[in-house]
Amino acid sequence: MVRIVKKGSVWTVIHSRFAQARNAMDPESADALVSAFKEFDADPSASVAVL
């Protein structure tokens, strides 16, 4: 699961999977991260992204 928390121009992108997965990356999570950063890149009001 990927969540985005926006506070003004700062975005926090959070990758969080269930405990058994130990936050391992899977194809679905990787696609969600790519989408999140593309969205960040396209937003002129966003200036900082924290992963």
Image (spheres, grey):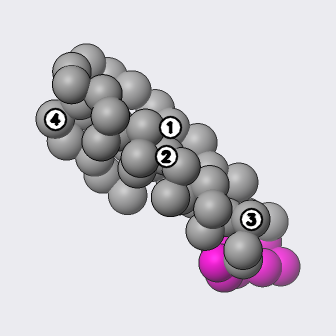
Residue at the image point whose x is 21% and y is 25% from the top? 44
Magenta span of residues? 19-25
Q: Are marks 4 and 3 in contact (CB under 8 Å)?
A: no
Q: Is residue 16 visible?
A: no
Residue at disc 4, secondary structure: loop
Check disc 2 and report the residue beneath it: 36
Kind of residue at disc 3? Glu
Q: Is residue 24 magenta?
A: yes
Residue at disc 1, secondary structure: strand
Q: CA distance from mark 4 to mark 3?
A: 26 Å
Between 11 and 45, the one lying in front of the other is: 45
Q: Are marks 1 and 2 in contact (CB under 8 Å)?
A: yes
Residue at disc 3, secondary structure: helix
Q: CA distance from mark 1 to mark 3?
A: 16 Å
Identify the mark at residue 28; answer none if there is no mark. 3
Q: Are marks 2 and 4 in contact (CB under 8 Å)?
A: no
Q: Position of residue 6 (x, y in %)?
A: 39, 26
Kind of residue at disc 2? Ala
Name which quarter of the figure residue 51 lies in: bottom left
Residue at the image point whose x is 58% and y is 42% from the top? 3
Q: CA distance from mark 2 to mark 4?
A: 14 Å
Kind of residue at disc 1? Ile
Q: Residues within 10 Å of mark 4 (few under 14, many from 20)?
A: few
Between 50 and 46, the one lying in front of the other is: 46
User: Left of 7 or right of it: where is 30?
Assistant: right
Between 6 and 30, the one lying in front of the other is: 30
